[in-house]
Image (tube, grey):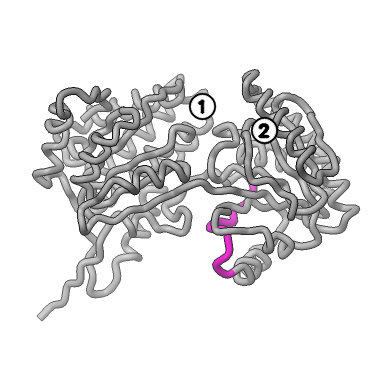
Amino acid sequence: MTVQQLVPVTQHRNLTELLAPFTTRGAVTMPFAPDAISLALSLGRRISRDAEARKQPALQALAFWLRKTELLRLQSAVQRIEGDGTVLVPRGTVFHLPPANVDTLFVYSWILALLAGNRNLVRLSSRGVPQASVLVRLVNEALAEHAGTPAGDGTVMLSYGHEAEITRALSAVCDVRVIWGGDATVNAVRAVPLPPRAIELAFPDRYSFAALDAAAVVALDDEALAAVADRVYIDTYWFDQLGCSSPRVLVWVGSAADCAVAGQRFVPALHARVRARGYGVDVGTALAKRTFAFRTAIDTDVQAVQWIANELAVIELAELGTLVRDHPGGGLLFQVGVASLDALAPILTSRDQTLSHFGFEREALVSFVHRLGANAFDRLVPVGSALQFDRVWDGFDLIAQFTRNVTVTGS
């Protein structure tokens, strides 16, 4: 089944035809069926070899995730989930509503549900962008290659706007609904009813930070500093800093002197990586950033606003308590120094998702998480890894959510 443009006309006659395999409950398989693994590997190969896709780092990251060793790792994880006396089976049909601003996310969500053995309905934004067009083309090729198999025939991807009737029809036949998007999107979709036994996963607006040990950064030579700056660049600038895991605050941890020196060294190093990577912003984004920065300076206690270039602006805060949570994206960072990671605790909320870090031992991070308790952060990952997708996301093990544990007791 290929990606289709659905035009809602006369009671969705086309939609009824598309959903026929889902109402007859066909095309469900066991987790990690050979045809599902084959489709995933085929898509990964196509992305890694395609000339247009090779120009897109986010697509190459997706191809790396779709390599055989990663799929085997996921399969091992499923085997660990399946305990004594239980068998994992697919839930049935998964309806995915990915965001428009992270073009690759629909593949991660779909592939995990596919590998779990499910049928899949994927709503793609009607607001197309070049990167998404390349990916949709390659997905179509992989699906066409697997036509006639449960993995290929059990997938329908369609593009439509915000027609509630279409979302209602798709929701009516699903067993899991996965909403990726802002709070407004989550609330709007949640108003659409689900079948009584269906479950829902929602991934709403989130906020993320980067914490760097100031003394560790001060101790770096220029080459090592450039490498760290490049990893922060990857976290920040992919998806124009609009991904839920994209850091918006640089937190320097250490003495006041070390924090000051670390910031003075790091910001020019990051700017150098921005230029080397060829990142640019349009006039509208640059104006929105400038307006946001100056409004923040007027309304909030800030120490300085560094307008390095249209692609990088830094707002230096006097303290974390003055942090403004609104954000325009496009390369704007708040910067603040604190004595320890614990200084983050008073401002954190359940909205805060990822802390990318540098210079901290795992034991210190584990201790920090225990002290936070239920307050915040679903992920603490090294800088450069903030946008790397994993089956455990926002505290949910997606493989576990896309399957059911069936109790089997012998006589």
Q: Are marks 1 and 2 in contact (CB under 8 Å)?
A: no
Q: SS class of the residue under badge 2?
A: loop
- First to last magenta residue range: 373-383
Residue under pointer 1: 56
In front of the other: 32 or 201:
201
Question: Picture coordinates of residue 391 (x, y %)?
Answer: 41, 52
Left/right of residue 167 with respect to residue 125 in the rendered view: left
Q: Residue furthest bottom?
A: 411
Amino acid of disc 1 = Gln
Q: Is residue 235 magenta?
A: no
Question: Picture coordinates of residue 152 (x, y %)?
Answer: 21, 36
Q: Is residue 379 magenta?
A: yes
Q: SS class of the residue under badge 1?
A: loop
Left/right of residue 333 with respect to residue 378 in the rendered view: right
Looking at the image, residue 68 lies above or below residue 277: below
> In this rendering, does residue 298 appear at all?
yes
Left/right of residue 163 with respect to residue 408 in the rendered view: right
Q: How many marks?
A: 2
Residue under pointer 2: 331
In front of the other: 126 or 387:
126
Location of the N terminus (image quadrant): top left
